[in-house]
Image: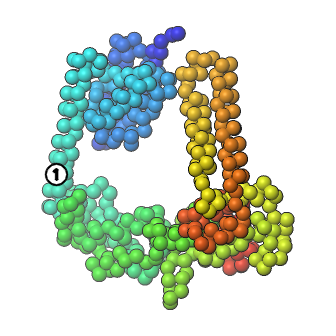
Amino acid sequence: MKRNVRAIGYVRVSKLGGRGGDSFLSPQLQREEIERAARREGLEVVDVLEELDASGRAGKRRPLWERAIAAVERGEVAAVIVYNVSRASRSVQDFLRADERVRAAGGRLVSAQENLSDDPSGVMTRNILLAIAQGESDRARATFAASAASAVERGMHHAGTIPLGYQRRPDRRLVPDPDTAPVVVGTFERRAKGWSWVRLARWLEEEGHQMSESGVRGLVRNPAYLGQARYGGTVKDDAHEAIVPRSLWKRCQAPRRRSARDGRLTQRYLLQGVAVCASCGRTMYLSGGKRHGKDYEHYICRRLECDEHAYARAGQLDSYVLNFVEEAVTGLDYDGVRTGAGLGEEAWRSATFVPRPGGDDGEIAEAEAALEGARADLDEFLADTKLRRVLGPDKHAEAAANYVAVVNKAEADLAETRERSAGSWELVGRLWNTEWGWAERKEWVERMVRSVVVSRGREPLSRRCEVELR
């Protein structure tokens, strides 16, 4: 069998810093050295990946570096060639982890400048170079942090982005922008009156400043508008002229609505992630709180790009959907009047399945684990491209069919096990009212309901809500 001599080159530059054109030689020099190393090692470079403005400490946040390693793991290339170890990584741990992945796949990392062989000399050289590369990175970080802290102490704005409402002078100090500072003050004033983030974003867009909902949130929470400069733990008050009075800024920091993200709403209602807006097709949010002692939590679409935001009271929508499910399963409406045939026997068992109270769920858990293992084995087999070449098309297809047969049998065994311990609609109702918490109820609803599409309007939910069952 012919030895794989294909290789992929990897080029990295930490910071472009505005460099480019003929004066920016680093990537080209790295490419030339990678080609020379390939000829020296008897390898054929099939591609060179250039990752610019990428830190050597970024680890998995360098997608092209990950792509190069993955190419070795898939058997597409036999080696990854870099200019030197610092171009691959400035972290000892990250480099060794990548080297281990490549070696486990039968490949190797090649440096155009250094000896990375497995002999003691090569291992020692590699470790020393990695330690030096990481030390240089650590020193650069410390120097940058000290420089940034010193700049903040002198009242300079160190962040790369200039806050809306300010201009930056040549000495890096901020001064109010007469054109945009009033817009910032207007944003704070409207937030203090209770405007939502979405409404503020729309208003800013009308004023000529496109900003996302999270961008508006960041603007309102930015202490730079109090005249404060900061970097890390270094804070300098009165570093520049404040745009927003401190009292107004503080009023805007108080939460206006109860957020679904803190769990207080999501663990009361069941359709988060299931209810979607009919206009934009995106998931609706849970929002709200209490007003005059009454709940007014609701599902609402808050997408800026949506033209017809859907809205529904959370309790009303949950009740409507649960009644819809019960009617679909039993064929009886809320008053016990028959409206349809209900589900067939097989669909009934699937819809109402819950383990019997006090029963032994171990058999079901074993069947589920067996199915999960069979599917994992099949996926691993199909992902092994080397095995396909070794076995040949016919034997590979025969082996794949055997794996599929095992998966099918595991699925049949799980269905049979569930059928033996299947419950009933009455059992669902009893567990719902006596034993189940929010998590069990939501899991069951998501197993029953594929989506709930809500349209904007004041009509009853029966006219503007479509429920799709699984």
Q: Residue at x 71, y 47 (%)?
A: 416
Measured as percent of width and height from the top left, residue 349 is found at 74, 57
Residue 368 placement, left or right of 257? right
Image quarter for residue 163? bottom left
Residue 153 visible here = yes
Position of residue 345 relative to residue 333, above or below, is above
Kindly give the residue lying farthest to the top in the view shown. Answer: 1
* Residue 19 visible within the image: no
Q: For the point 59% across and 21% down, which residue is it?
A: 388
Q: Is residue 183 above or below residue 37?
A: below
Q: Position of residue 237 (x, y in %)?
A: 19, 69
Residue holding disc 1: 147
Q: Position of residue 279 (x, y in %)?
A: 65, 65
Quadrant of the drawing holding the C terminus: bottom right
Quarter assignment of residue 454: bottom right
Residue situated in front as seen by the camera: 294 or 396: 396
**Residue visible at 72% across and 52% down?**
419
Identified by mark 1, the residue type is Ser
Name the quadrant containing residue 445. Answer: bottom right
Query: Residue at 83% across / 76% down in the picture?
Result: 337
Q: Secondary structure at mark 1?
A: helix
Colour scheme employed for the rendering of this structure: rainbow
Residue 211: % across, % down: 45, 63
